[in-house]
Image (cartoon, grey):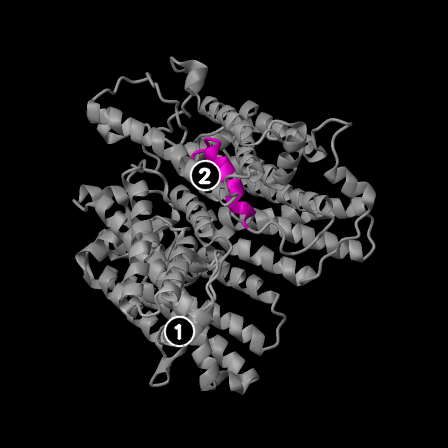
C-alpha cells in the first residue's frame, strides 16, 4: 500500500520469507479470538441498542429497507476486499457504478433490449477495471493514485454520456425485480444476488489456489513472484472483477431507483472501503476474510437503520459512529498490544484481545523483550 | 511499492557525488518545468481561441479559484511526502468555515486575526488527532483520515443542524479578504502565495522539513538515522490540519454562504492537485511549489473548458486524464533516472 505509515517496519524486498498469513483460528483461544467474533458481538449490541431506540428495529420490514439501502455498496465491497487483500486499492468503484448507470440510461433511450443492456453495462464496468489493472500492473503505477484519477475520469465520462439528464422509464418487470423481495420472504432480491456473489468470492478467496495466491501477493509481493505466482495477471483479474461488479451495481441501483443518472452513488467508494477495513481486511494486504466483510456490512447497515429509526438521536450521528468505529477497530487492538508490551507481557500466542488482521504482529519491541 | 525508490530525492542517493545530485536536481526541474509548460500551453491555446481569456478579470478569477486549493494542496504535500495521506481535509475545512461564519455572524466586532487563529487552531487540533492516531495509535493514515473524514463531517452536520451562514450577516471587512484585492492582485491569491512560499522554504531549508523527505523515502532508514519519525509525522499532520483550517476561514470569506456540506468532495481534488504537481503518493518526493501549480492547473482547466465552450461535462474527465498522465510521466522519469544512475555507477566501476 502506498500510504504505509512510517511507524511500521517495512520488510526488505525479497529478504525474509513471506510470513504465512496468521491463522487466528489455530491460536489457543480459537474461534473466540477471531475478529469476526468481535464484529458479531458488536452486531448483537447494535441489535439490543436498536431495539431500545425503536421497537420497529428488529422487524422484517426494517431488515428489508436497511439491506436494500446498502445493496450496491455491499456488492462492490466483495471484490474490493480481494483487491485490498492483494495490497492494492480501487477507489474508482462508485464512478464505475455511475458510468454503468449512465450507459444503461443512454442505451435504453436508444431502444436496446434491457437484457442486452445489462450485459453491456457489466462489460463497460469490466473495461473500466481493465484500464485500472493495466495502469497498475503494466505501467507499475500506485493504485491509490491511479484510482483517484479514474474516480474523476469515469465520473466525468458518465456525465459526458448522459449529461445532467436522467432516464426513468425502465420496464416495470425489471424495476420490480430489483426492488422486490425474494419469493414472499422479507429478503430483498438484491440480497440474494449479494449472497450468491459473497459465496462466490468467499470460495474464490478461501478455497482455491487463486485465493491463496492473493494472500501471498498481499503478504509479500516479491516473494510471491519468486514462488512462481503470476502477480500481474492475478492483480489484473482482481481489478477487472472489481470493475465488473461495480458495473453490475450500477445496473442494480438504476433499476432499484428506476433512475439512471450520472450523479448516483457519490461517495460510495468510501463506504465500501470502510466496510472492507471494518471487516478486518488489512489495508496493507495479506490479511482478511469475506465473512468478516459481510459481517461488517451487516453492522454498518444495522447502525444506519437504528439511528435512522430513532427519534431521540439525530441521524447525523451515523457518520460520527461510523468514523469512530472504523478508527477504533484498528486503534483499540493496537493500544491494547502497546499496553501489554509496556507491561512486558509478551507471551506469544496468548491473545486475550481478538486478533486484529490489521495489527502488525512483528514489532521490534516484541522481539527485543 | 517498488516505484518509491525510483523517484527518491537526494538524501538517499548512494553516491553523494555532485554528478548524481545534479542529475536528481535536473529531474526535479524537469518535473516542475513540465507542469509549468502544461499550464502555459493550456493558457496559450485558450488565449488564442478566445483572447478575452487573458483579460485582468478572467486572470483574477483564475487566481481566486486556485487560491484555496493551493493552500490545501500545500498541507496535503506535507503529509504525502511522509508517505501518509490526509483524506479529512474537506471535513476540517467545513468545520472551520462554519465556525468562522457563526462567530462573525454572532459577534461582528471580533477582530479578523482572532478568527484566523481560531480556524487554524481548530484545524491544527483535528490534525493533531489524526497525527496521534497515526503515530501513537499505529493506525494506517488512510484508515484514520477516512474515519475522521466521516466523523468530522458528521460533527459539522450536528453542529449546523440544517442552518447556514449567509453573506449578509458577515462584516464587509471580512468578506473583503475573499473578494478584494491589493494593487490589483486578489488578497486571497497573496495569502496563498505567502503560505506556499513559507511551506516551500520550510521543506527546502529546515532540518525538520528535510527530515520529512527522509521519512517518506524510507521510514526505517530515517528512524535508524536518528530522525524522530513519530514527532515529525505528527507535526506534518498538525500543519496540514492548520492549513485546512485556514482554507476553511478563507472559504467563508470567499463564498459567504456556508453550510455543513461545505467543501465536500475536495479531498480527492486536493490530492489530485498535489500529485499532478509531482508529489508522489509513495512519499519522499515532490515540492509545495509543484503542488500549488498543480492546483492552478486544475483550476485553469475548468475555466478554459468554459471559455472554449467545451461541454462542462468533460471537465472531470479531463482532470482524471491529466492525473493519470502526470503519474505515468513521473514513473517514466523515475525509470530514466534509475537507468542513468546505474549506467554511471557501471562506468565508474569499470
Q: Main secondary structure of the magenta part?
A: helix
Q: Looking at the image, do the residues carrying marks 2 and 1 touch, with CB atoms under 8 Å apart?
A: no
Question: Residue, x 42% and y 71% (percent of image)?
Answer: B254
* Location of residue A188 with respect to A246 vertically, above or below: above
Q: Which residues are magenta?
A: A267-284
Q: Quadrant of residue A344?
A: top left
Q: Quadrant of residue A16?
A: top left
For residue A30, side relative to residue B21 (left or right): right
The residue beneath circle 2 is A321
x and y percentages locating residue B30 in the rendered image: 36, 67
User: Closer to the camera, A124 or A47?
Assistant: A47
Say few, some or many: other residues with alpha carbon within 10 Å of mark 1 (under 14 / 14 to 19 / 20 or more): some
User: Closer to the camera, B189 or B20?
Assistant: B189
- What subunit carries mark 1? B
Q: Which mark is residue A327?
A: none
Badge count: 2
Is A271 covered by the magenta stretch? Answer: yes
| Marks 2 and 1, how far apart at CA | 35 Å
Say few, some or many: other residues with alpha carbon within 10 Å of mark 2 (under 14 / 14 to 19 / 20 or more): some
Question: Residue, x 57% and y 31% (percent of image)?
Answer: A54
x and y percentages locating residue B239 in the rendered image: 28, 56
Q: Quadrant of the C terminus of chain A?
A: top left
The residue beneath circle 1 is B175
x and y percentages locating residue B102 in the rendered image: 40, 61
- What subunit carries mark 2? A
* Location of residue B205 with respect to B148 vertically, above or below: below
Q: Quadrant of the N terminus of chain A?
A: top left
For residue A237, side relative to residue B140 (left or right): right
x and y percentages locating residue B172 in the rendered image: 39, 76
For residue A49, side relative to residue A158 (left or right): left
Asked whether residue A232 is in view, the answer is no
Is B320 covered by the magenta stretch? Answer: no
Amino acid at each position: 500500500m502506498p500510504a504505509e505509515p512510517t511507524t511500521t517496519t517495512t520488510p526488505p524486498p525479497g529478504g525474509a520469507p513471506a510470513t504465512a498469513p496468521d491463522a487466528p483460528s489455530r491460536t489457543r483461544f480459537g474461534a473466540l479470538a477471531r475478529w469476526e467474533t468481535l464484529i458479531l458481538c458488536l452486531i448483537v449490541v447494535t441489535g439490543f441498542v436498536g431495539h431500545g431506540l425503536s421497537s420497529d428495529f428488529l422487524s422484517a420490514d426494517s431488515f428489508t429497507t436497511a439491506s436494500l439501502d446498502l445493496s450496491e455498496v455491499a456488492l462492490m465491497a466483495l471484490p474490493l476486499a480481494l483487491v485490498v487483500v492483494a495490497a492494492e486499492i480501487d477507489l474508482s468503484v462508485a464512478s464505475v457504478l455511475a458510468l454503468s448507470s449512465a450507459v444503461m440510461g443512454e442505451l435504453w433511450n436508444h431502444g436496446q433490449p434491457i437484457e442486452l443492456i445489462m450485459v453491456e453495462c457489466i462489460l463497460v464496468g469490466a473495461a473500466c477495471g481493465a484500464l485500472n489493472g493495466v495502469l497498475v500492473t503494466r505501467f507499475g503505477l500506485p493504485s491509490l493514485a491511479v484510482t483517484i484519477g479514474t474516480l474523476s475520469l469515469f465520473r466525468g465520462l458518465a456525465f459526458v454520456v448522459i449529461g445532467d439528464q436522467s432516464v426513468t422509464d425502465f420496464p416495470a418487470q425489471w424495476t420490480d425485480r430489483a426492488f422486490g423481495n425474494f419469493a414472499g420472504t422479507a429478503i430483498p432480491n438484491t440480497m440474494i444476488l449479494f449472497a450468491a456473489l459473497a459465496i462466490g468470492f468467499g470460495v474464490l478467496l478461501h478455497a482455491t489456489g487463486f485465493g491463496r495466491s492473493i494472500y501471498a501477493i498481499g503478504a509479500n509481493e516479491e516473494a510471491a513472484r519468486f514462488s512462481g505466482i503470476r502477480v500481474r495477471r492475478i492483480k489484473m483479474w482482481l481489478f477487472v472483477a472489481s470493475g465488473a461488479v461495480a458495473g453490475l451495481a450500477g445496473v442494480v441501483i438504476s433499476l432499484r431507483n428506476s433512475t439512471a443518472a450520472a450523479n448516483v452513488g457519490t461517495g460510495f467508494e468510501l463506504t465500501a472501503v470502510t466496510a472492507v477495513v471494518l471487516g478486518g481486511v488489512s489495508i496493507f494486504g495479506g490479511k482478511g476474510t469475506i465473512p468478516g466483510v459481510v459481517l461488517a456490512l451487516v453492522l454498518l447497515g444495522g447502525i444506519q437503520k437504528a439511528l435512522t429509526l430513532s427519534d431521540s438521536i439525530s441521524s447525523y450521528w451515523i457518520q460520527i459512529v461510523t468514523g469512530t468505529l472504523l478508527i477504533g477497530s484498528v486503534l483499540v487492538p493496537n493500544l491494547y498490544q502497546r499496553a501489554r508490551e509496556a507491561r512486558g507481557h509478551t507471551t506469544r500466542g496468548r491473545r486475550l484481545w481478538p486478533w486484529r488482521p490489521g495489527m502488525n504482529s512483528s514489532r521490534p519491541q516484541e522481539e527485543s523483550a | 511499492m517498488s516505484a518509491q525508490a525510483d523517484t527518491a530525492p537526494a538524501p538517499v542517493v548512494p553516491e553523494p557525488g555532485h554528478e548524481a545530485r545534479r542529475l536528481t536536481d535536473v529531474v526535479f526541474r524537469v518535473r516542475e518545468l513540465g507542469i509549468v509548460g502544461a499550464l502555459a500551453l493550456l493558457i496559450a491555446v485558450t488565449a488564442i481561441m478566445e483572447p478575452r481569456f487573458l483579460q485582468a478579470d478572467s486572470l483574477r478569477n483564475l487566481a481566486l479559484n486556485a487560491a484555496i486549493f493551493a493552500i490545501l494542496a500545500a498541507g496535503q504535500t506535507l503529509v504525502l511526502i511522509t508517505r501518509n495521506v490526509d483524506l479529512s481535509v474537506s471535513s476540517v475545512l467545513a468545520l472551520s468555515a462554519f465556525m468562522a461564519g457563526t462567530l462573525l455572524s454572532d459577534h461582528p466586532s471580533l477582530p479578523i486575526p482572532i478568527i484566523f487563529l481560531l480556524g487554524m487552531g481548530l484545524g491544527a487540533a483535528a490534525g493533531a488527532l489524526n497525527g496521534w492516531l497515526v503515530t501513537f495509535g499505529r493506525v494506517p493514515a488512510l484508515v484514520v483520515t477516512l474515519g475522521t473524514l466521516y466523523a468530522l463531517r458528521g460533527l459539522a452536520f450536528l453542529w449546523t443542524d440544517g442552518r447556514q451562514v449567509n453573506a449578509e450577516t458577515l462584516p464587509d471587512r471580512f468578506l473583503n479578504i475573499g473578494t478584494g484585492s491589493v494593487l490589483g492582485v486578489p488578497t486571497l491569491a497573496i495569502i496563498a502565495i505567502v503560505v506556499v512560499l513559507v511551506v516551500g522554504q520550510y521543506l527546502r531549508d529546515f532540518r525538520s522539513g528535510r527530515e520529512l523527505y527522509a521519512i517518506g523515502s524510507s521510514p526505517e532508514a530515517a528512524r535508524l538515522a536518528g530522525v524522530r519519525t513519530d514527532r515529525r509525522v505528527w507535526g506534518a499532520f498538525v500543519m496540514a490540519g492548520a492549513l485546512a483550517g485556514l482554507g476553511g476561514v478563507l472559504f467563508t470569506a470567499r463564498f459567504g454562504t456556508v453550510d455543513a456540506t461545505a467543501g465536500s468532495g475536495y479531498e480527492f481534488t486536493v490530492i489530485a492537485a498535489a500529485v499532478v504537481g509531482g508529489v508522489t503518493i509513495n512519499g519522499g518526493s515532490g515540492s509545495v511549489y509543484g503542488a500549488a501549480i498543480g492546483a492552478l492547473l486544475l483550476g485553469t482547466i475548468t475555466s478554459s473548458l468554459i471559455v472554449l465552450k467545451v461541454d462542462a461535462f468533460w471537465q472531470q474527465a479531463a482532470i482524471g486524464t491529466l492525473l493519470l498522465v502526470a503519474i505515468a510521466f513521473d514513473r517514466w522519469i523515475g525509470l530514466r533516472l534509475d537507468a542513468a544512475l546505474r549506467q554511471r555507477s557501471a562506468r565508474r566501476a569499470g
